[in-house]
Every structure is written in C-alpha cells, then in structure tokens.
Image (cartoon, rainbow, N blue to C red):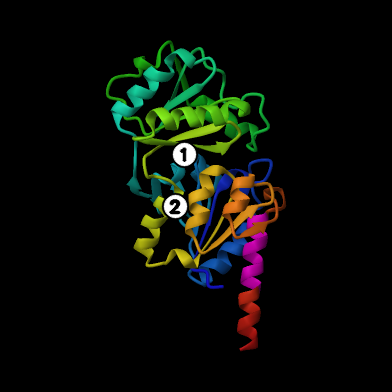
Amino acid sequence: MTIKAVVTDMDGTFLDDRGGFDRKRFERVLVRLEAKGIPFIVASGNGLQRLLALFAGFEDRVMFLAENGGLFYHKGEVLFRKTLEPSVVENLIEYYREKAAEYCLMVSSDRTIYIDERAPQPFAGTDIAITAAQLQAFWDRITRLRDLREIPSGTTITHAGFWVKEELVDRLVADCNQVFGEQVLAVTSGYGSVSILPKGVHKAWGLEQILHGLGIEARDVLAFGDSDNDLELLSYVGHSYAMANATDRVKVAADNLAPSHVDQGVLVVIEEYLKGEEDATSQD
C-alpha cells in the first residue's frame, strides 16, 4: 500500500492507559516518517492546549487537528477554526439548564471551561486514561457559575460539550441530535465525553481541508481510531485501522484491526509498514 500521511486519534488509540506514549519509540518512528515526507497528524476531540502539552518537544513536527476536526494548528499558527454560533450555545444552555445535575454541560473559551455549579465534577471517579496532572490541569480551567447564562458578556465561546455517566451517553446524544440536529452534531469520544460540533464538521471534514493543502488523496492516508467520533475519519481514508479496544461500530467501519492502545498499536502498525517499505527497497 502507498501511504502519504498518517492520522491518529489520541485517547484510547495513540495514548496508552496512563494517557501517555513511548516518546523515544515515537521519535524513532517520526524520523523515519519524516525521511519519507509523510506527515504525522493528530486528530482528536481534545483541545489544542492539551495536545500541545502531550507533544511537548514535537510541536513543530506534528500537525494538530483538534476539537474533533474544528481546529487545525501547525508550526505555531491556527490555520482554520470552526466554532458554534452564539445563538446555538444560548439555546443549548437554555434547553439543558434544568438538567445540570445530570448532564454536565461544558461551555468553553480558549482558557476557561464554564459549568453549572450543580453539575458533577467532569471525569471524577472514572478510569479515564489521563495522568493525574493532566486531569488536574483540566479541572483548573473550570469556573462554576450559578447559571450558565451568567457567562461574562463578550466571551468568545470556542467549544461546547457534555460529560455524563457512561450509561447516559446514548440517550444524551440521541436527544441532542433530535432537538438541535439542524445546527449541530453530538458525538461521543469515550469516558462519558460528548462533543457538540457545528453541523458538517468532524474529523474527516477537517482532514479533507488539510489534505487539499498538502496535495494528498484520502486513498493514500493511514488512520487509526477507537470511538464513535472516529467513524467518519475511518470511512474517509484509504487505509483504516480500529484498535483492538475500539467500539463495535468502529471495528465495522475500519478495514483492519490494530493491537490495543495499551500495546502501542498505532506505532506497531506504522513500524510494520515502514519495515515493509524498507525491505522492498533493499530488494530492488
């Protein structure tokens, strides 16, 4: 197969069960990809700041497609960003205001995450694959308000999403898409996290914008994922891998199965591809 770009989700895919990755092994793989001119693209539901922290030292060697395809960052510059219309955010706040104790609606600016004071602490008591320091950094951004309608005037809202108990995810996603489906798409990325995206924006949409600028066809892209917010991405590219720990829907959507994120399955597959390329070259 011909590979001209590699794209991977983060949590449950590239990151291990501690929310990290083998940096020395990744460095070796990245050097080999760079030698072939193959960009490494992170495609995640996470915000840009967490992704930059995870890849500290690699910031200028990796492309970042954050916020489930809504933001593209490369070498210190945001190249595009899609955000929710203020009226949509207002309607979400109003609709879910009386359900704050059950559905933790998170409305975010670049620096602050606003949640209702009645809402549970996001991800508390879960087995989310993230270090304690990373989770604390996320919590430190939270500002609790008596009412989300009290978000300071003039605040630029960049993202909205929910955190709920796992057993409530499907119900919330279905309800949100039924009520607001003409304007947004609610999609889960695991661990009770639900992102609210502008209609038509997802990882495949964001990747398409990047590939157009690079002159790369989707059929020449290798991509990895594990959760439902990866479905469009895996269906879009020519070479798709679901992780062994992926949801059943993701495994159906992907063409291939990679080892678990715990076993660094993304790096395993990339290494196997690179070795095959190198073996073929040595035989020529």
Q: Residue furthest left?
A: 154
Amino acid at circle 2: Ala
Viewer-proximal residue among 84 and 114: 84
x, y percent for residue 215:
37, 67
Q: Which residues are magenta?
A: 265-275
- In the displayed image of the protein, which residue is found farthest to the top? 146
Residue 225 left/right relative to 73: right
Q: Which mark is residue 159?
A: none
Element under disc 1: loop
- Which disc number belongs to residue 47? 1
Within 10 Å of disc 1 (Cα), the crowding (few <14, some 14-19, many 20+) is: some
Sequence-first disc among 2 and 1: 1
Q: Nearer the viewer, mark 2 or mark 1?
A: 2
Q: What is the distance, in whole Å, between disc 2 and disc 1 at their CAs?
A: 17 Å
100 shown above or below 203: above
Name the residue tied to disc 2.
Answer: 204
